[in-house]
Image (cartoon, rainbow, N blue to C red):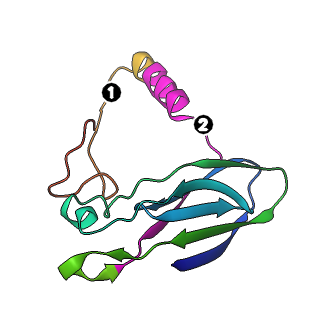
Amino acid sequence: TVVLDVDVLLDEPGDHVLEVGTVPGHTIEIDGVVVAKDDRRSGVEVILDSSINNPAGVPATVHVDAPRRVRVRASLLVTRAQGYGNLVRAELRHRVPAPSVEQEIADAARAARAADLTVLVVGTNEEVESEGWDRTSL
């Protein structure tokens, strides 16, 4: 088991979303509270299906009134990936307080309806793009 402890300074008031993306075999705690636990062991399949490239996580909302530090602890079982070696994978994600996706889409739709011309650009980024990894939506 590999344990990663990180203090994250949240200095903007509002609801922050913290998430640790990792493969099976982990316990994730935020300020001592378990927010995700998976006792399964992962192996070479996380390499072959590319899930290691964009590992799933469980988002946790942390409300902040005044700047403070939040402790994030990830206890990770070592993935034994056969010829690919032994590894652990953890990706800390942080979304600052902001309007919801639904609110941003509604605001964009309202602005587009009011405009004489609208240019819409869509695409993917490194977080969702991975050769050999199928997805159900853009």
Mark in front: 2 vs 1: 2
Pick whichever, 30 or 115, lies toward us: 30
Decide if residue 96 is in sight here.
Answer: no
> Which residue carries the number 1 mark?
118
Residue 76 locus on image (x, y percent): 50, 71
Under mark 2, the amino acid is: Pro
Horizontal side of residue 29 vs 41, given as left or right: right
Identified at 41% across, 71% down, the residue is 89
Does the image show residue 22?
yes
The residue at the point 57 percent across, 35 percent down is 100
At label 1, the amino acid type is Thr
Whether residue 70 sits left or right of residue 36 in the image: it is right
* Residue situated in front as seen by the camera: 14 or 88: 88
Discs 2, 1 touching: Cβ within 8 Å: no
Which residue in the structure is indicated by mark 2?
A: 99
Magenta part of the chain: 87-111
* Front position in the image: 101 or 130: 130
